[in-house]
Amino acid sequence: MPTPLEQAYAYIKAGDIEKAKRLLAQILKQNPRDENAWLWMSHCVVEIEQKRYCFERVLTINPQNQSAIEGLKRLDNPVPLNPPQKAKVIQRQPVKLVKKKGLDTKGIIAVIGLGVALCSICGVFVILFLNPSNGATAKVLSAADTFEVSAIDVVKDGGYTVTSTVCEVVSPERNVLYGIDLGKIVFHAFRISNTTLGKEVVVLFTSNHTAEDGTGLVFTVNPEAARLFPDFPDVTRRSEHPITVDTPGAQEALDCARQAGKPPALEFRNFDVEAWRRETIKKFGGEQTNPDGSKDDYVRFALPICKQSNAERETMLTNLGADYEGSFQQFVIETFCPYVR
């Protein structure tokens, strides 16, 4: 029996694009990181920006996927199917103006009165529109929570310094694309700088995770982030449901980041965290950068273990069983957690 992905491919080969699209949507709803499903979805959508988004999702998961690389090249360098045709000049007939009988004084007064009433109503709508209450509130992240924001890795790997606390906002909207609910829209905004910039810049990223959820995919949102980090997908260019600075929650995150204080530091009780990191690398192997921009950072992995409740700790120990001895979890609990505040 063919797998769902093989069945979707069969639909595409048979020319039944709608069935393939529906099946791929189900696959991606269950696993948004299925690079092959995103690749085949690019064959099912029509608009260029939809195809571009599919290819970019593939490369976010696997930057070496040649099919997606070639697909983007074709979109950036399209081959014209037909030579350009000479434009036809259309002669327009002059429009005849017909003079109409004007309003009398009573009519003018009535029109003015109606206009004033309408403007009053419009004013109410303008006020409501310019001052929306979308329920999105900004949360200033702690030093420990900041470790769970993948955008921080993106910024530091680019040679920038984070100069403020990180502001997190969960949008009341959902990230829906081609009928697929891809989860929450979470904004992370903060200020960065380096010697080249010469000033602080506020950058806005979006992802499918809060700091409490752990790391996840990263996308640029505001023009500053898109310009400084062009290798990461820009979700503002999606033809369907783009995520922009106008998406509910984005402005709250930006406003928070503009006023945010200095980034908090982790507090340790006379503990050399970098020495601990070196010892951990010797024992468990080197830290790696993942295709989505997040890092296998041992300090990041250690902090959630230290924050576990008693019930969560018991569940972890039960699941590990005999494998707990000599595990990373045991190493963290014994050598890292006692020093973390």
Image: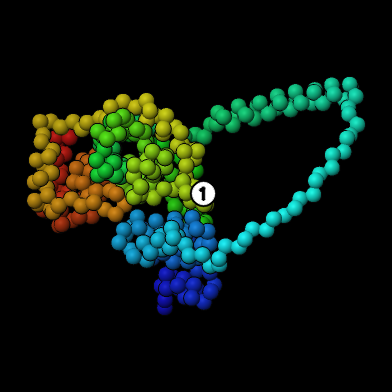
**The quadrant where residue 311 appears:** top left
Residue count near mark 1 (Cα–Cα under 10 Å), binned few <14, some 14–19, many ≥20: some
Return the x and y of residue 144 as percentages of the image width and height: 25, 36
Does residue 288 appear in this view?
yes
Asked whether, in this view, residue 185 is left or right of residue 157, the answer is right
Please give the name of the residue rendered at 38% of the width and 64% of the height, measured from the top-left corner: 70
The residue at 12%/49% (across/down) is 281
Q: Quadrant of residue 29?
A: bottom left
Q: Could you tell me which secondary element the residue under label 1 belongs to?
A: loop
Q: Position of residue 130 (x, y in %)?
A: 57, 29
Front position in the image: 13 or 332:
13
Amino acid under disc 1:
His
Query: Which x, y percent locates residue 71?
Result: 41, 63
Give percent across and percent down for residue 151: 32, 43
Describe residue 7's horizontal placement relative to residue 64 as left or right: right
Q: Quadrant of the C terminus?
A: top left
Q: In the drawing, does residue 262 fall left or right of residue 239?
A: left
Nearer the observer, 134 or 42: 42
Q: Quadrant of the N terminus?
A: bottom left
Q: Which residue is mark 1?
A: 241
Q: Residue at x 70, y 24 (%)?
A: 120
Q: Is residue 61 above or below residue 133?
A: below
Query: What colouring does the structure picture have?
Result: rainbow
Q: Residue at x 11, y 42 (%)?
A: 276
Residue 113, placed above or below residue 320: above
Q: Nearer the viewer, residue 82 or 240?
A: 82
* Residue 212 visible in the displayed image: no
Q: How many marks?
A: 1
